[in-house]
Each structure stands twice: as C-alpha cells, then as structure tokens.
Image (cartoon, helix red, strand yellow):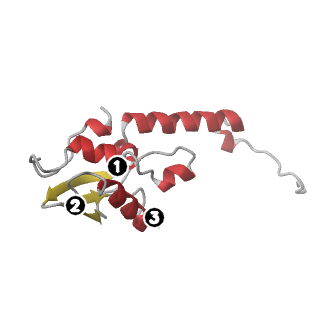
Amino acid sequence: MPRAELALPHTPATSASPTEAEVLAALEQVVDPCSVTAGVPLSLVDMGLVVGWSYAGGVLDLSLTVTGPGCTYLGLLADAAGQVLRGLPVVAEVRVAFVPDIVWDESRMSDRGRGLLAGRRQRTVAALGLRPRMWQEARPLAGVDQP
C-alpha cells in the first residue's frame, strides 16, 4: 500500500484542522534532496520520511526522519515543509522536529517511490553494462604494468 494511504500518527481532526490527506498532499510537494542527487526526485512522503504530525490552535507539529545520520539538509527540509504546510488554510505556524532514533531504510518508502528507484537502478545497470558479481572478474588496469 502506498505510504500516502497509510494512517500516520496525528491528533484527531476537528472542523478547523487540516486533514491527513491535506497534510500529505502538501508534503508531496517537498522533494528530498538526496533523492535528487540519486537521480530520482522523490517527495518526503514517497521517501517515507514523514513520521507523524499533530495540530492544535493553528500550530502544526511535524515529525520527520532523514535517510542518514549525517544529513546536512535538515534546515532545508524543515523550511520547505514549513512553507508548504503554512499554505494550508488553518495553519499559522509549523514546527518541525527530526526523530533521530528512527533508522530509515527502503521499507519506509511508498510503493511508488520504490518503483521509481528500482527503475532508476535498472536504467543505470543497463547504461553501464553492469552484471551481477562483475566486480569479482579480474581485469588489468589500463596503463599499469602487470607482473
């Protein structure tokens, strides 16, 4: 089931609070910079970086994880998420917290995200002519004298 359809931990909606669908739709607009580097731009939702959220009195608290402990994009992710979430009608303030004890892996990704990543891997393998266990094949290095 795609991550966007999963129920994330959040406070119950009231008539004056954003719905889960609205929050996830907004976060679909924020692209994870690491996925861009990998050549597969994926949203925070598709990457499985959204841990949960709560809303009270105009303030939306968002919990995110990152793909690695040394992530240098924390500020960028927080700013981008805050910008799109403040675009929701009843959200006046957004507070983003990063959850350091969640270890990200591909199982957190949406089906769509995993599919796009798999497609990128297949295109790379085809373009480079890679084969399984290719690294085990002994090949002389060009320009290096061999014994």
Q: Is residue 95 left or right of residue 116?
A: left
In terms of depth relative to the viewer, which is nearer, 138 or 124? Answer: 124
The amino acid on which the numbered mark 2 sits, given as a three-letter code, is Asp
Mark 1 residue element: helix
Q: Measure the alpha-carbon separation of dots 3 and 2.
A: 19 Å
Image quadrant in which you'd find residue 130: top right
Which residue is labeled 2 in the image?
Answer: 61
Please state the horizontal and vertical placement of residue 51, each as a whole percent of the image: 26, 53
Is 122 displayed left or right of 79 in the figure?
Answer: right
Q: Amino acid at mark 3?
A: Tyr
Percent coordinates x, y for residue 7 in the rendering = 20, 41
Q: Which residue is mark 3?
A: 73
Of helix, strand and loop, which one carries label 3?
Answer: loop
Q: Is residue 14 rendered to the left or right of residue 29?
A: left
Kindly identify the amino acid type of the residue bearing the numbered disc 1: Leu
Q: Position of residue 55 (x, y in %)?
A: 16, 56
At a point 56% along the width and 37% down the height, the residue shown is 120
- Looking at the image, do the residues carrying marks 1 and 2 touch, with CB atoms under 8 Å apart? no
Residue at image location 41% in from the left, 56% down from the top: 67
Q: Mark on residue 27? A: 1
Q: Secondary structure at mark 2?
A: strand
